[in-house]
Amino acid sequence: MRMLGRRSEAVEHPFRAMRPDEGGGAASPTHVGFVAQVARPLVLIERVGQRDTIFAACPVALGLGLVPGMAAAHARALVGDLDVRDAEPEADLAWLDRLALHAVAHWTPTACRAGNDGLLLDVTGATHLFGGEVRFCRRVLAFLARLGFTARIAIARTPGAAHALARYSGQPIVRLQPAEEAQALASLPVAALRLESEALNAAARFGLDRIGDLYSMPRAPLARRLGMKTMTRLDQALGRVAEPIVPVVPVEAPEAIRRLLEPIGTAESIAQVITDLVDDLVAVLVERGLGVRTALLIASRVDGADQRIAIGASRATRDPKRLVRMFALKIERIDPGLGIEAMRLVVPRSEPLGAINTGTLLAVKDEAADLAPAIDQLAGRAGEEAVFRLGLEQSDVPERAVRRVGPLEVPAGWPRWTRPARLLRRPEMLTQVMALLPDHPPRRFTWRGKPYRVVAGDGPERIHGEWWRRSNELWAVRDYFRVEVEDGQRFWLFRRGDGVEPETGDLSWYLHGVFG
Protein backbone atom coordinates (compact mmCIF):
# COMPACT_ATOMS: atom_id res chain seq x y z
CA MET A 1 0.00 0.00 0.00
CA ARG A 2 1.24 3.52 -0.78
CA MET A 3 0.26 6.81 0.82
CA LEU A 4 -1.02 9.66 -1.31
CA GLY A 5 0.79 13.04 -1.28
CA ARG A 6 4.50 13.85 -1.51
CA ARG A 7 5.64 10.49 -0.29
CA SER A 8 5.28 7.59 -2.65
CA GLU A 9 7.31 4.93 -0.86
CA ALA A 10 5.70 1.84 0.55
CA VAL A 11 4.53 2.05 4.17
CA GLU A 12 3.59 -0.42 6.81
CA HIS A 13 0.14 -1.96 6.74
CA PRO A 14 -1.98 0.19 9.08
CA PHE A 15 -3.52 -2.87 10.78
CA ARG A 16 -0.33 -4.87 11.21
CA ALA A 17 0.34 -5.97 14.77
CA MET A 18 2.67 -3.72 16.83
CA ARG A 19 5.70 -4.80 18.85
CA PRO A 20 5.05 -5.63 22.48
CA ASP A 21 5.91 -2.93 25.00
CA GLU A 22 7.67 -5.29 27.41
CA GLY A 23 10.88 -5.51 25.42
CA GLY A 24 12.59 -6.37 22.20
CA GLY A 25 12.00 -9.31 20.08
CA ALA A 26 10.29 -10.03 16.88
CA ALA A 27 6.78 -8.89 16.38
CA SER A 28 4.24 -11.63 16.81
CA PRO A 29 0.69 -11.55 15.56
CA THR A 30 -2.02 -10.95 18.11
CA HIS A 31 -4.87 -13.44 18.30
CA VAL A 32 -8.14 -12.01 19.47
CA GLY A 33 -10.46 -14.45 21.19
CA PHE A 34 -14.19 -13.96 21.56
CA VAL A 35 -15.79 -15.33 24.71
CA ALA A 36 -19.44 -16.20 24.34
CA GLN A 37 -21.48 -14.88 27.20
CA VAL A 38 -23.78 -17.58 28.42
CA ALA A 39 -27.20 -16.25 29.30
CA ARG A 40 -28.38 -16.76 32.84
CA PRO A 41 -31.04 -19.44 33.19
CA LEU A 42 -34.44 -17.79 33.53
CA VAL A 43 -37.50 -19.25 35.23
CA LEU A 44 -40.94 -17.83 35.94
CA ILE A 45 -42.53 -18.78 39.23
CA GLU A 46 -46.12 -18.75 40.46
CA ARG A 47 -47.71 -19.24 43.85
CA VAL A 48 -49.41 -22.63 44.25
CA GLY A 49 -50.84 -23.14 47.69
CA GLN A 50 -48.12 -22.40 50.24
CA ARG A 51 -45.08 -22.67 47.96
CA ASP A 52 -43.61 -21.15 44.80
CA THR A 53 -43.29 -23.43 41.80
CA ILE A 54 -41.78 -22.99 38.37
CA PHE A 55 -44.38 -21.91 35.85
CA ALA A 56 -42.10 -21.75 32.77
CA ALA A 57 -38.37 -22.08 32.07
CA CYS A 58 -36.07 -20.95 29.27
CA PRO A 59 -34.12 -23.51 27.16
CA VAL A 60 -30.96 -23.00 29.28
CA ALA A 61 -32.90 -23.74 32.47
CA LEU A 62 -34.56 -26.76 30.91
CA GLY A 63 -31.14 -28.08 29.95
CA LEU A 64 -30.09 -27.81 33.61
CA GLY A 65 -33.04 -29.92 34.71
CA LEU A 66 -35.36 -27.13 35.87
CA VAL A 67 -38.81 -28.15 34.68
CA PRO A 68 -42.24 -26.58 35.24
CA GLY A 69 -43.83 -27.75 38.50
CA MET A 70 -40.53 -27.93 40.41
CA ALA A 71 -40.33 -26.02 43.68
CA ALA A 72 -38.57 -22.67 43.35
CA ALA A 73 -36.47 -23.35 46.44
CA HIS A 74 -35.24 -26.62 44.95
CA ALA A 75 -34.37 -24.82 41.70
CA ARG A 76 -32.35 -22.17 43.55
CA ALA A 77 -30.47 -24.90 45.38
CA LEU A 78 -29.56 -26.67 42.13
CA VAL A 79 -28.54 -23.55 40.18
CA GLY A 80 -26.91 -20.69 42.04
CA ASP A 81 -26.93 -18.05 39.31
CA LEU A 82 -30.65 -18.31 38.56
CA ASP A 83 -32.78 -15.45 37.23
CA VAL A 84 -36.17 -15.78 38.93
CA ARG A 85 -39.13 -13.65 37.92
CA ASP A 86 -42.83 -13.67 38.67
CA ALA A 87 -45.12 -15.23 36.08
CA GLU A 88 -48.04 -13.28 34.66
CA PRO A 89 -50.54 -15.88 33.42
CA GLU A 90 -53.28 -13.30 32.82
CA ALA A 91 -51.01 -11.27 30.54
CA ASP A 92 -50.03 -14.43 28.65
CA LEU A 93 -53.65 -15.38 28.08
CA ALA A 94 -54.50 -11.86 26.93
CA TRP A 95 -51.64 -12.01 24.43
CA LEU A 96 -52.84 -15.38 23.12
CA ASP A 97 -56.34 -13.96 22.71
CA ARG A 98 -54.93 -11.07 20.68
CA LEU A 99 -52.99 -13.52 18.55
CA ALA A 100 -56.15 -15.58 18.00
CA LEU A 101 -58.00 -12.46 16.84
CA HIS A 102 -55.15 -11.75 14.43
CA ALA A 103 -55.44 -15.30 13.10
CA VAL A 104 -59.17 -14.84 12.51
CA ALA A 105 -58.56 -11.61 10.61
CA HIS A 106 -55.61 -12.77 8.48
CA TRP A 107 -55.30 -16.57 8.37
CA THR A 108 -58.49 -18.56 8.96
CA PRO A 109 -62.02 -17.71 10.13
CA THR A 110 -61.93 -20.27 12.97
CA ALA A 111 -59.32 -19.95 15.71
CA CYS A 112 -59.21 -20.21 19.48
CA ARG A 113 -56.76 -20.41 22.35
CA ALA A 114 -55.51 -23.92 23.20
CA GLY A 115 -54.59 -24.00 26.87
CA ASN A 116 -52.15 -21.38 28.13
CA ASP A 117 -49.41 -21.90 25.57
CA GLY A 118 -50.88 -22.34 22.10
CA LEU A 119 -53.50 -21.66 19.47
CA LEU A 120 -55.88 -23.99 17.65
CA LEU A 121 -56.70 -23.09 14.03
CA ASP A 122 -59.16 -24.78 11.69
CA VAL A 123 -57.36 -24.36 8.36
CA THR A 124 -59.82 -26.40 6.30
CA GLY A 125 -60.24 -24.66 2.95
CA ALA A 126 -57.88 -21.79 3.84
CA THR A 127 -54.32 -23.01 3.20
CA HIS A 128 -54.66 -22.90 -0.59
CA LEU A 129 -54.79 -19.11 -0.32
CA PHE A 130 -51.20 -19.20 0.95
CA GLY A 131 -49.83 -21.78 -1.47
CA GLY A 132 -50.48 -24.96 0.51
CA GLU A 133 -50.22 -26.19 4.08
CA VAL A 134 -46.42 -26.16 4.27
CA ARG A 135 -46.10 -22.61 2.97
CA PHE A 136 -48.86 -21.53 5.33
CA CYS A 137 -46.94 -22.96 8.29
CA ARG A 138 -43.74 -21.25 7.19
CA ARG A 139 -45.55 -17.95 6.91
CA VAL A 140 -46.94 -18.26 10.42
CA LEU A 141 -43.53 -19.17 11.82
CA ALA A 142 -41.94 -16.19 10.07
CA PHE A 143 -44.60 -13.89 11.49
CA LEU A 144 -44.00 -15.17 15.03
CA ALA A 145 -40.23 -14.90 14.56
CA ARG A 146 -40.61 -11.21 13.73
CA LEU A 147 -42.43 -10.80 17.03
CA GLY A 148 -39.62 -12.59 18.89
CA PHE A 149 -41.35 -15.93 19.46
CA THR A 150 -40.44 -19.49 18.60
CA ALA A 151 -43.18 -21.95 17.77
CA ARG A 152 -43.94 -25.42 16.47
CA ILE A 153 -46.88 -26.19 14.20
CA ALA A 154 -48.66 -29.49 13.58
CA ILE A 155 -51.45 -30.09 11.09
CA ALA A 156 -53.64 -33.10 11.77
CA ARG A 157 -57.19 -34.32 11.28
CA THR A 158 -58.08 -33.95 14.97
CA PRO A 159 -57.32 -31.14 17.45
CA GLY A 160 -55.97 -33.66 19.97
CA ALA A 161 -53.42 -35.08 17.53
CA ALA A 162 -52.32 -31.61 16.45
CA HIS A 163 -51.94 -30.54 20.09
CA ALA A 164 -49.79 -33.59 20.92
CA LEU A 165 -47.53 -33.42 17.87
CA ALA A 166 -46.94 -29.67 18.16
CA ARG A 167 -45.70 -30.02 21.75
CA TYR A 168 -43.96 -33.41 21.85
CA SER A 169 -42.73 -34.21 18.33
CA GLY A 170 -39.74 -31.84 18.52
CA GLN A 171 -40.09 -30.75 14.88
CA PRO A 172 -40.96 -27.19 13.77
CA ILE A 173 -43.55 -28.35 11.22
CA VAL A 174 -45.44 -31.64 11.29
CA ARG A 175 -48.01 -32.48 8.62
CA LEU A 176 -49.98 -35.61 9.40
CA GLN A 177 -51.97 -37.44 6.75
CA PRO A 178 -55.51 -38.66 7.60
CA ALA A 179 -55.84 -42.07 9.30
CA GLU A 180 -52.23 -41.89 10.58
CA GLU A 181 -53.02 -40.57 14.06
CA ALA A 182 -52.54 -43.88 15.89
CA GLN A 183 -49.13 -44.54 14.37
CA ALA A 184 -47.89 -40.97 14.86
CA LEU A 185 -49.03 -40.73 18.50
CA ALA A 186 -47.85 -44.17 19.61
CA SER A 187 -44.30 -43.02 20.52
CA LEU A 188 -45.37 -39.83 22.34
CA PRO A 189 -45.66 -39.69 26.14
CA VAL A 190 -49.01 -40.09 27.83
CA ALA A 191 -48.90 -36.43 28.90
CA ALA A 192 -49.49 -35.46 25.25
CA LEU A 193 -53.15 -36.44 25.68
CA ARG A 194 -53.80 -33.41 27.95
CA LEU A 195 -54.53 -35.59 30.99
CA GLU A 196 -55.02 -34.46 34.56
CA SER A 197 -52.25 -34.89 37.11
CA GLU A 198 -54.13 -37.74 38.85
CA ALA A 199 -54.38 -39.66 35.57
CA LEU A 200 -50.68 -39.09 34.84
CA ASN A 201 -49.68 -40.34 38.29
CA ALA A 202 -51.87 -43.41 37.85
CA ALA A 203 -50.35 -44.12 34.43
CA ALA A 204 -46.85 -43.85 35.91
CA ARG A 205 -47.75 -46.34 38.68
CA PHE A 206 -48.94 -48.90 36.13
CA GLY A 207 -45.94 -48.36 33.84
CA LEU A 208 -47.85 -46.71 31.01
CA ASP A 209 -45.33 -44.28 29.59
CA ARG A 210 -46.32 -44.02 25.92
CA ILE A 211 -49.65 -43.51 24.18
CA GLY A 212 -49.06 -46.71 22.25
CA ASP A 213 -49.20 -48.63 25.55
CA LEU A 214 -52.88 -47.73 25.84
CA TYR A 215 -53.89 -49.24 22.49
CA SER A 216 -53.66 -52.91 23.45
CA MET A 217 -55.23 -52.60 26.88
CA PRO A 218 -58.94 -53.42 27.45
CA ARG A 219 -61.01 -50.25 27.70
CA ALA A 220 -62.98 -51.17 30.83
CA PRO A 221 -59.94 -51.82 33.12
CA LEU A 222 -58.12 -48.85 31.57
CA ALA A 223 -61.04 -46.52 32.24
CA ARG A 224 -61.27 -47.82 35.83
CA ARG A 225 -57.58 -47.14 36.46
CA LEU A 226 -57.08 -43.85 34.57
CA GLY A 227 -60.62 -42.43 34.47
CA MET A 228 -63.19 -41.94 31.73
CA LYS A 229 -61.74 -38.56 30.79
CA THR A 230 -58.54 -40.31 29.73
CA MET A 231 -60.53 -42.51 27.35
CA THR A 232 -62.31 -39.45 25.97
CA ARG A 233 -59.01 -37.69 25.34
CA LEU A 234 -57.64 -40.76 23.58
CA ASP A 235 -60.74 -41.09 21.39
CA GLN A 236 -60.61 -37.39 20.54
CA ALA A 237 -56.99 -37.63 19.46
CA LEU A 238 -57.70 -40.66 17.27
CA GLY A 239 -60.82 -39.15 15.73
CA ARG A 240 -63.36 -41.51 17.31
CA VAL A 241 -65.08 -38.71 19.24
CA ALA A 242 -65.68 -35.24 17.87
CA GLU A 243 -64.00 -32.31 19.60
CA PRO A 244 -65.69 -29.02 18.69
CA ILE A 245 -63.74 -25.79 18.34
CA VAL A 246 -65.28 -22.72 19.95
CA PRO A 247 -63.89 -19.88 17.82
CA VAL A 248 -63.12 -16.43 19.09
CA VAL A 249 -65.32 -13.63 17.77
CA PRO A 250 -63.62 -10.27 17.08
CA VAL A 251 -66.73 -8.34 18.06
CA GLU A 252 -69.65 -9.95 19.80
CA ALA A 253 -72.53 -9.75 17.36
CA PRO A 254 -75.84 -8.44 18.71
CA GLU A 255 -78.35 -11.24 19.10
CA ALA A 256 -81.62 -12.20 20.73
CA ILE A 257 -82.74 -15.72 21.71
CA ARG A 258 -86.15 -17.17 22.55
CA ARG A 259 -86.49 -20.74 23.81
CA LEU A 260 -90.06 -21.97 23.53
CA LEU A 261 -91.95 -24.02 26.10
CA GLU A 262 -93.69 -25.99 23.36
CA PRO A 263 -92.71 -26.49 19.70
CA ILE A 264 -94.46 -24.24 17.18
CA GLY A 265 -95.18 -24.82 13.51
CA THR A 266 -97.76 -22.33 12.23
CA ALA A 267 -96.88 -19.19 10.30
CA GLU A 268 -98.74 -17.00 12.80
CA SER A 269 -96.82 -18.32 15.79
CA ILE A 270 -93.50 -18.01 13.95
CA ALA A 271 -94.34 -14.40 13.01
CA GLN A 272 -95.17 -13.61 16.64
CA VAL A 273 -91.83 -14.98 17.86
CA ILE A 274 -90.02 -12.99 15.16
CA THR A 275 -91.76 -9.83 16.39
CA ASP A 276 -90.65 -10.54 19.96
CA LEU A 277 -87.07 -11.24 18.82
CA VAL A 278 -86.94 -8.00 16.85
CA ASP A 279 -88.11 -6.02 19.88
CA ASP A 280 -85.40 -7.61 22.03
CA LEU A 281 -82.79 -6.99 19.35
CA VAL A 282 -83.71 -3.33 18.89
CA ALA A 283 -83.14 -2.73 22.58
CA VAL A 284 -79.62 -4.18 22.26
CA LEU A 285 -78.93 -2.11 19.14
CA VAL A 286 -80.06 1.12 20.80
CA GLU A 287 -77.78 0.42 23.76
CA ARG A 288 -74.78 -0.09 21.46
CA GLY A 289 -75.67 2.65 18.97
CA LEU A 290 -75.79 0.25 16.01
CA GLY A 291 -78.06 -0.39 13.06
CA VAL A 292 -78.79 -3.58 11.13
CA ARG A 293 -77.28 -4.15 7.70
CA THR A 294 -77.62 -7.95 7.70
CA ALA A 295 -79.75 -10.05 10.04
CA LEU A 296 -79.88 -13.84 10.28
CA LEU A 297 -82.79 -15.77 11.78
CA ILE A 298 -82.00 -19.32 12.96
CA ALA A 299 -84.92 -21.60 13.83
CA SER A 300 -83.91 -24.81 15.64
CA ARG A 301 -86.27 -27.73 15.10
CA VAL A 302 -86.88 -30.61 17.49
CA ASP A 303 -85.07 -33.00 15.15
CA GLY A 304 -81.85 -30.98 15.45
CA ALA A 305 -82.00 -29.34 12.02
CA ASP A 306 -81.73 -25.55 11.65
CA GLN A 307 -83.73 -23.36 9.31
CA ARG A 308 -82.07 -20.09 8.31
CA ILE A 309 -83.35 -16.99 6.59
CA ALA A 310 -81.38 -13.78 6.13
CA ILE A 311 -82.35 -10.22 5.28
CA GLY A 312 -80.23 -7.29 4.17
CA ALA A 313 -80.92 -3.59 4.57
CA SER A 314 -79.68 -1.08 2.02
CA ARG A 315 -79.08 1.37 4.86
CA ALA A 316 -78.45 0.77 8.56
CA THR A 317 -81.74 0.61 10.43
CA ARG A 318 -83.25 -0.47 13.71
CA ASP A 319 -86.88 0.25 12.89
CA PRO A 320 -88.79 -2.76 14.30
CA LYS A 321 -91.70 -2.48 11.86
CA ARG A 322 -89.38 -2.43 8.90
CA LEU A 323 -87.38 -5.44 10.13
CA VAL A 324 -90.53 -7.46 10.86
CA ARG A 325 -91.92 -6.63 7.42
CA MET A 326 -88.71 -7.79 5.74
CA PHE A 327 -88.77 -11.11 7.61
CA ALA A 328 -92.46 -11.58 6.77
CA LEU A 329 -91.55 -11.66 3.06
CA LYS A 330 -89.39 -14.76 3.64
CA ILE A 331 -91.31 -16.53 6.38
CA GLU A 332 -92.66 -19.13 3.93
CA ARG A 333 -89.09 -20.41 3.43
CA ILE A 334 -89.03 -21.79 6.99
CA ASP A 335 -89.88 -25.48 7.15
CA PRO A 336 -91.01 -26.15 10.76
CA GLY A 337 -90.94 -29.93 10.34
CA LEU A 338 -92.08 -31.53 13.60
CA GLY A 339 -91.89 -28.19 15.37
CA ILE A 340 -89.52 -25.34 16.25
CA GLU A 341 -88.24 -25.26 19.82
CA ALA A 342 -85.88 -22.25 19.73
CA MET A 343 -85.29 -19.20 17.55
CA ARG A 344 -82.28 -16.92 17.47
CA LEU A 345 -81.83 -13.58 15.70
CA VAL A 346 -78.21 -12.55 15.01
CA VAL A 347 -76.78 -9.43 13.36
CA PRO A 348 -73.52 -10.49 11.67
CA ARG A 349 -73.12 -7.12 9.95
CA SER A 350 -73.97 -3.83 11.62
CA GLU A 351 -73.03 -0.18 11.29
CA PRO A 352 -72.95 2.71 13.75
CA LEU A 353 -76.29 4.49 13.84
CA GLY A 354 -76.83 7.57 15.96
CA ALA A 355 -80.05 9.22 17.02
CA ILE A 356 -82.90 9.02 14.51
CA ASN A 357 -85.14 11.99 13.72
CA THR A 358 -88.61 10.50 13.94
CA GLY A 359 -90.37 13.68 12.81
CA THR A 360 -90.95 17.34 13.54
CA LEU A 361 -93.96 19.40 14.46
CA LEU A 362 -93.88 21.27 11.15
CA ALA A 363 -93.85 19.33 7.92
CA VAL A 364 -90.96 20.01 5.57
CA LYS A 365 -92.09 20.11 1.95
CA ASP A 366 -88.64 19.94 0.36
CA GLU A 367 -87.52 16.92 2.38
CA ALA A 368 -86.60 14.03 0.08
CA ALA A 369 -88.37 10.72 0.59
CA ASP A 370 -86.36 7.86 2.06
CA LEU A 371 -86.16 5.12 -0.57
CA ALA A 372 -84.46 2.57 1.69
CA PRO A 373 -87.70 0.86 2.90
CA ALA A 374 -89.02 0.53 -0.65
CA ILE A 375 -85.70 -0.83 -1.89
CA ASP A 376 -85.59 -3.38 0.92
CA GLN A 377 -89.12 -4.50 0.00
CA LEU A 378 -88.14 -4.96 -3.64
CA ALA A 379 -84.94 -6.78 -2.73
CA GLY A 380 -86.86 -9.11 -0.42
CA ARG A 381 -89.23 -10.09 -3.22
CA ALA A 382 -87.00 -10.09 -6.30
CA GLY A 383 -83.60 -10.70 -4.71
CA GLU A 384 -80.73 -8.41 -3.78
CA GLU A 385 -79.09 -8.75 -7.21
CA ALA A 386 -82.23 -7.53 -9.01
CA VAL A 387 -82.26 -4.04 -7.45
CA PHE A 388 -79.50 -1.67 -8.55
CA ARG A 389 -78.72 1.63 -10.23
CA LEU A 390 -76.50 2.53 -13.13
CA GLY A 391 -73.35 4.45 -12.38
CA LEU A 392 -70.71 6.05 -14.54
CA GLU A 393 -67.34 4.49 -15.29
CA GLN A 394 -64.42 6.55 -16.54
CA SER A 395 -64.60 5.55 -20.19
CA ASP A 396 -65.71 7.17 -23.45
CA VAL A 397 -66.85 3.92 -25.04
CA PRO A 398 -70.58 3.54 -24.16
CA GLU A 399 -70.53 -0.17 -23.32
CA ARG A 400 -67.66 0.44 -20.89
CA ALA A 401 -68.98 3.66 -19.36
CA VAL A 402 -71.86 2.13 -17.37
CA ARG A 403 -71.65 -0.11 -14.32
CA ARG A 404 -73.96 -1.37 -11.61
CA VAL A 405 -73.93 0.48 -8.29
CA GLY A 406 -75.92 0.25 -5.08
CA PRO A 407 -79.58 1.23 -5.21
CA LEU A 408 -79.02 4.15 -2.80
CA GLU A 409 -75.92 5.57 -4.46
CA VAL A 410 -76.29 8.84 -6.37
CA PRO A 411 -74.49 8.58 -9.73
CA ALA A 412 -72.75 11.71 -10.94
CA GLY A 413 -70.77 12.81 -13.99
CA TRP A 414 -73.17 11.77 -16.74
CA PRO A 415 -72.19 13.14 -20.19
CA ARG A 416 -74.16 16.06 -21.57
CA TRP A 417 -75.01 14.06 -24.68
CA THR A 418 -78.32 12.21 -24.54
CA ARG A 419 -78.03 8.49 -23.90
CA PRO A 420 -80.69 5.84 -24.68
CA ALA A 421 -82.81 4.31 -21.94
CA ARG A 422 -81.89 0.80 -23.11
CA LEU A 423 -78.35 -0.02 -24.16
CA LEU A 424 -77.81 -3.35 -25.92
CA ARG A 425 -75.28 -5.69 -24.40
CA ARG A 426 -73.46 -5.75 -27.76
CA PRO A 427 -74.02 -3.52 -30.78
CA GLU A 428 -76.00 -5.34 -33.49
CA MET A 429 -75.03 -4.95 -37.12
CA LEU A 430 -77.46 -3.29 -39.57
CA THR A 431 -77.92 -4.31 -43.19
CA GLN A 432 -79.17 -2.58 -46.35
CA VAL A 433 -78.17 0.82 -45.00
CA MET A 434 -78.55 3.87 -47.24
CA ALA A 435 -76.74 7.01 -46.03
CA LEU A 436 -74.81 10.00 -47.37
CA LEU A 437 -71.18 10.32 -46.28
CA PRO A 438 -69.65 11.63 -44.15
CA ASP A 439 -71.98 13.52 -41.76
CA HIS A 440 -75.53 12.41 -42.54
CA PRO A 441 -77.68 9.85 -40.69
CA PRO A 442 -78.97 6.84 -42.62
CA ARG A 443 -82.16 7.05 -44.69
CA ARG A 444 -83.01 3.38 -44.57
CA PHE A 445 -81.72 0.32 -42.69
CA THR A 446 -82.76 -3.22 -41.75
CA TRP A 447 -82.50 -4.50 -38.18
CA ARG A 448 -83.36 -8.06 -37.14
CA GLY A 449 -84.93 -8.72 -40.54
CA LYS A 450 -87.29 -5.72 -40.43
CA PRO A 451 -86.78 -2.66 -42.68
CA TYR A 452 -87.03 0.85 -41.22
CA ARG A 453 -87.32 4.25 -42.89
CA VAL A 454 -85.82 7.23 -41.08
CA VAL A 455 -87.85 10.43 -40.92
CA ALA A 456 -85.53 12.51 -38.67
CA GLY A 457 -81.99 12.30 -37.39
CA ASP A 458 -79.46 14.14 -35.26
CA GLY A 459 -75.68 13.84 -35.09
CA PRO A 460 -72.96 12.87 -35.42
CA GLU A 461 -71.36 12.45 -31.97
CA ARG A 462 -67.83 11.22 -32.58
CA ILE A 463 -66.20 8.82 -30.11
CA HIS A 464 -62.61 7.69 -30.55
CA GLY A 465 -61.21 4.35 -29.48
CA GLU A 466 -59.26 3.94 -26.25
CA TRP A 467 -55.81 3.24 -27.62
CA TRP A 468 -54.33 2.82 -24.12
CA ARG A 469 -56.50 -0.27 -23.60
CA ARG A 470 -56.08 -2.01 -26.96
CA SER A 471 -53.67 -1.34 -29.75
CA ASN A 472 -56.28 -2.01 -32.47
CA GLU A 473 -58.32 0.96 -31.20
CA LEU A 474 -55.59 3.44 -32.06
CA TRP A 475 -57.41 4.72 -35.17
CA ALA A 476 -60.92 3.50 -34.31
CA VAL A 477 -63.73 6.05 -34.74
CA ARG A 478 -67.48 5.81 -34.13
CA ASP A 479 -70.01 8.38 -35.34
CA TYR A 480 -73.27 8.09 -33.37
CA PHE A 481 -76.67 9.32 -34.63
CA ARG A 482 -80.10 9.58 -33.02
CA VAL A 483 -82.73 8.68 -35.55
CA GLU A 484 -86.55 8.44 -35.56
CA VAL A 485 -88.36 6.02 -37.85
CA GLU A 486 -91.85 6.19 -39.34
CA ASP A 487 -93.67 4.40 -36.48
CA GLY A 488 -92.18 6.79 -33.90
CA GLN A 489 -89.41 4.59 -32.53
CA ARG A 490 -86.07 6.23 -31.84
CA PHE A 491 -82.77 4.39 -32.12
CA TRP A 492 -79.13 5.08 -31.37
CA LEU A 493 -76.94 4.10 -34.33
CA PHE A 494 -73.28 4.46 -35.11
CA ARG A 495 -71.02 4.07 -38.11
CA ARG A 496 -67.53 2.66 -37.85
CA GLY A 497 -65.12 5.10 -39.45
CA ASP A 498 -65.20 8.80 -40.26
CA GLY A 499 -65.88 8.30 -43.98
CA VAL A 500 -62.54 9.84 -44.97
CA GLU A 501 -59.65 7.75 -43.62
CA PRO A 502 -59.95 3.99 -44.26
CA GLU A 503 -57.92 3.18 -41.11
CA THR A 504 -60.70 4.52 -38.86
CA GLY A 505 -63.27 1.86 -39.82
CA ASP A 506 -64.99 -0.13 -42.53
CA LEU A 507 -68.10 2.16 -42.68
CA SER A 508 -70.39 -0.59 -41.31
CA TRP A 509 -73.48 0.45 -39.34
CA TYR A 510 -74.64 -0.84 -35.93
CA LEU A 511 -77.57 -0.29 -33.59
CA HIS A 512 -76.44 0.27 -30.01
CA GLY A 513 -79.49 1.48 -28.05
CA VAL A 514 -83.21 2.28 -28.01
CA PHE A 515 -84.80 5.49 -26.67
CA GLY A 516 -88.04 5.29 -24.70
Image (tube, rainbow, N blue to C red):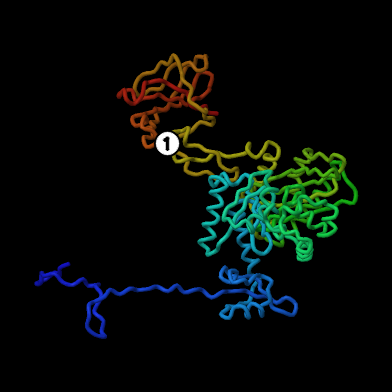
Percent of width and height locating residue 476 = 36, 29
Percent of width and height locating residue 427 = 48, 25
Q: Quadrant of residue 62?
A: bottom right
Q: Residue furthest right?
A: 262
Q: Residue furthest bottom?
A: 22
Residue at image point 81% right, 46% down: 300
The C terminus - image quarter: top right
Instruction: Decide: is 270 above or below 164.
Output: above
Considering depth in this image, is 208 or 342 the residue closer to the camera?
Answer: 208
Judge the density around disc 1: few (<14), some (14-19), many (≥20) Cα neighbours within 10 Å. few
Q: Is residue 369 visible?
A: no
Percent of width and height locating residue 153 = 60, 55
Q: Amino acid at mark 1?
A: Asp
Considering depth in this image, is 194 or 490 the residue closer to the camera?
Answer: 194
What element does badge 1 sit on? loop
Q: Residue furthest front?
A: 25
Position of 272 compared to 416: left or right? right
Instruction: Decide: is 487 above or below 271.
Output: above
Mark 1, residue position = 396
Residue at image point 55% right, 48% down: 134
Instruction: Decide: is 105 above or below 412.
Output: below
Q: Quadrant of residue 481?
A: top left
Residue at image point 52% right, 30% down: 423
The N terminus - image quarter: bottom left
Q: How many marks?
A: 1
Q: Is residue 477 visible?
A: yes
Considering depth in this image, is 114 or 377 the residue closer to the camera?
Answer: 114
Percent of width and height locating residue 490 = 51, 25
